[in-house]
Image (spheres, helix red, strand yellow):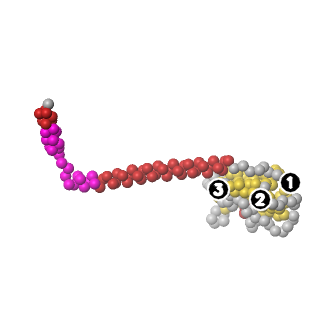
């Protein structure tokens, strides 16, 4: 039994010695290849982790927005006033018209601004307008909705701008886009009048009677 074991060990050693040896060039290639492979693996794993975190963050933000609760409107009036304004190109040439519809006016103490709840301070509240903008052109349209409307309080000559908005609002080709405008006002009974029109054009008065 001892003789057989020695023979087997000797045979194994001979076989191992007879294996082809790597050249210096092959060794160098292996030395350079191993770090490169490790870097590629780390890069792929890094991208995977980054994408997962980004997706989770986006889902979390969307979920937070959907879960925001605000108090309902204290007052509401249906207006349903429709206006048409020209759409002009870079050369100030009219290329079409857009519909500017004021659907409702509301008084609210809580609104959502940029995905967060905003609450009015004591003795103040928010006037909120719900709008719909219709684009009949076969291309996208971008406008500042607040440029077409001003607010007058108690027949004042001052024209107040709606400072809370989603401008610039982009409307797809041949489509309608809902949006909102809001402005802080005193929380008392007062006469509210909207003046609607182009900046350099005539204005139409729309009374709000809550």
| Residue 166 image point, x, y percent | 68, 58
Identify the magenta region: 9-31
Q: Disc 2 or 3, which lies upstream in sequence?
A: 2
Which one is closest to the eye, mark 1 or mark 2? 2
The one nearer the camera, 81 or 10, is: 10
Label 3: state its secondary structure.
Answer: strand
Label 2: state its secondary structure.
Answer: loop
Which one is closest to the eye, mark 1 or mark 3? 1
Question: Which label sits on residue 120?
Answer: 2
> Alpha carbon of mark 2 to alpha carbon of mark 3: how far?
28 Å
Mark 3, residue position: 170
Label 1 close to label 2 by CB (< 8 Å): no
In the rendered image, the residue lying farthest to the top is 1
Question: Which label sits on residue 210?
Answer: 1
Q: Residue at x 15, y 34 (%)?
A: 5
Res. 204 image quadrant: bottom right
Viewer can see residue 173? no
Local crowd at mark 3 within 10 Å, few (<14), some, or many (≥20)? some
Label 1: state its secondary structure.
Answer: loop
Question: Which label sits on residue 105?
Answer: none
Would residue 15 be counted in the magenta stretch?
yes
| Residue 208 image point, x, y percent | 84, 56
Q: Residue at x 77, y 50 (%)?
A: 71
| Residue 125 image point, x, y percent | 80, 58
Horizontal relation, residue 172 to residue 121: left or right? left
In the rendered image, the residue lying farthest to the front is 2
Viewer can see residue 111? yes
């Amino acid at each position: 039994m001892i003789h057989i074991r020695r023979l087997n060990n000797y045979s194994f050693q001979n076989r191992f010695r007879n294996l082809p040896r790597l050249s210096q060039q092959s060794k160098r290639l292996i030395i350079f290849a191993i770090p490169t492979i490790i870097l590629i693996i780390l890069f792929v794993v890094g991208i995977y982790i980054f994408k997962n975190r980004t997706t989770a963050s986006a889902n979390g933000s969307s979920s937070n927005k959907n879960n925001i609760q605000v108090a309902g409107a204290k007052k509401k009036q249906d207006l349903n006033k429709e206006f048409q304004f020209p759409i002009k190109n870079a050369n100030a040439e009219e290329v079409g018209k857009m519909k500017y519809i004021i659907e409702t006016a509301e008084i609210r103490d809580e609104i959502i601004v940029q995905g967060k709840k905003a609450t009015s301070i004591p003795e103040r509240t928010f006037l909120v307008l719900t709008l719909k903008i219709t684009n009949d052109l076969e291309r996208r349209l971008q406008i500042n909705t607040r440029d077409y409307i001003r607010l007058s309080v108690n027949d004042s000559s001052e024209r107040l701008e709606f400072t809370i908005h989603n401008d610039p609002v982009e409307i797809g080709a041949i489509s309608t886009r809902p949006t909102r405008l809001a402005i802080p006002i005193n929380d008392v009974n007062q006469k509210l009048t909207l003046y609607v029109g182009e900046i350099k054009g005539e204005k139409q008065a729309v009374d709000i009677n809550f």
